[in-house]
Image (cartoon, grey):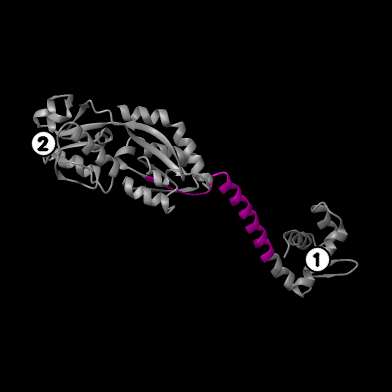
Amino acid sequence: MDIKILKSFIAVAKHLSFSEAAQELHTVQPAISRHISSLEEQLGVSLFIRNSREVSITQAGEQLVKDATAILALTERAKSKVKLVDSGQLGSLSIAYLSSACLTFLAKLIRTYKSQFPNVHVTLLEMTATEQIEALKSERVDVAFSRPLPSTIADEFISETMYVDRLVAVVNKNHPFASVQTIDLKTLKNEPFILFNRDEALGLFDEIITRCKRAGFSPNIISQPRHMQTLVTEVAAGLGLAIAPYCVSKLYSEGCHFIELEKVDTQIYLQLQYKQINRSATTQAFVEMALDAQAEIQLSMRN
């Protein structure tokens, strides 16, 4: 059933007049008559009883009024939703993130986004860098706040650098080194090391090992936790010291002291990553908002 024909039918049913229906729809009466005849022929029933003086509706017509009204309302809702989705006002958005790297800004960013796009369903997924790579490849997430992607898939995504972090030493507040602000990495060669698990952040782990070897030693690794909060907690408990991105200081780190590493200029990028092509309007809107907040995000990581 054509939508235009259904509108003609509802107008006739409303006015019980072909001429008044034509006036409402800004058309001519013969066009309305053709629409009704066509509809009756399609359905094989009479919808109106008409004579020279009046028009009345049949029981079949009364039933069709209910159904046609619902169909037209559904059509209008569909049009509205399509426009909302196209503008990013309706839909869903799944965001993967590194907890330690995003702690200072993510909640505020999501609040700002939701204030402008209240009908978008947002899902936050805490993942390690390795987990995010798989989630992006399988399209389980729309955007990711993570470390640089491996070259094998980097061309499929756009990567925007949100801020650049640095490596620091993390020691217990009672450690002999807790009174210093900077330290040469080689000074730590006899210490027990806690390093973030290699399977979860391959590039980070290998960079730390490389830096230690350049300093003339291989670290004595006593623990490889899979969560940065666990790493910080183990240091606070006095189990060893850690080399980690400075962003871990934003976690619950009472009992820890963070020390700048001399002659270690490693740059650790936090990037916003999303698909190169066929990205949704909700994704594009979030990306634009995140980039607008880039300067504020960078400032939050310096404090």
Are there few (<14), some (14-19), or many (20+) residues within 10 Å of tag 2? some
Q: Are marks 1 and 2 in contact (CB under 8 Å)?
A: no
Q: Residue at x 85, y 63 (%)?
A: 33
Along the polypeptide, which appears first: circle 1 or circle 2?
1
Assess whether residue 44 is covered by the magenta stretch. Answer: no
Q: Inspect this view and state whether residue 53 appears.
A: yes
Q: Nearer the viewer, residue 156 or 57?
A: 156
Residue at mark 1 to residue at mark 2: CA–CA distance? 89 Å
Quadrant of the frame with the C terminus: top left
Are there few (<14), some (14-19), or many (20+) residues within 10 Å of tag 1? many
Tag 2: amino acid: Glu
Query: Up-down: is 35 above or below 23?
Result: below
Q: Which residues are magenta?
A: 67-96
Q: Residue at x 80, y 67 (%)?
A: 38
| Label 1: which secondary element | helix
Q: Inspect this view and state whether residue 117 appears.
A: no
Q: Nearer the viewer, residue 80 or 63?
A: 80
- The tag on residue 36 is 1
Query: Up-down: is 55 above or below 184?
Result: below
Q: What count of labels does the image hold?
A: 2
| Label 2: which secondary element | loop
- The tag on residue 191 is 2
Query: Up-down: is 161 above or below 180?
Result: below
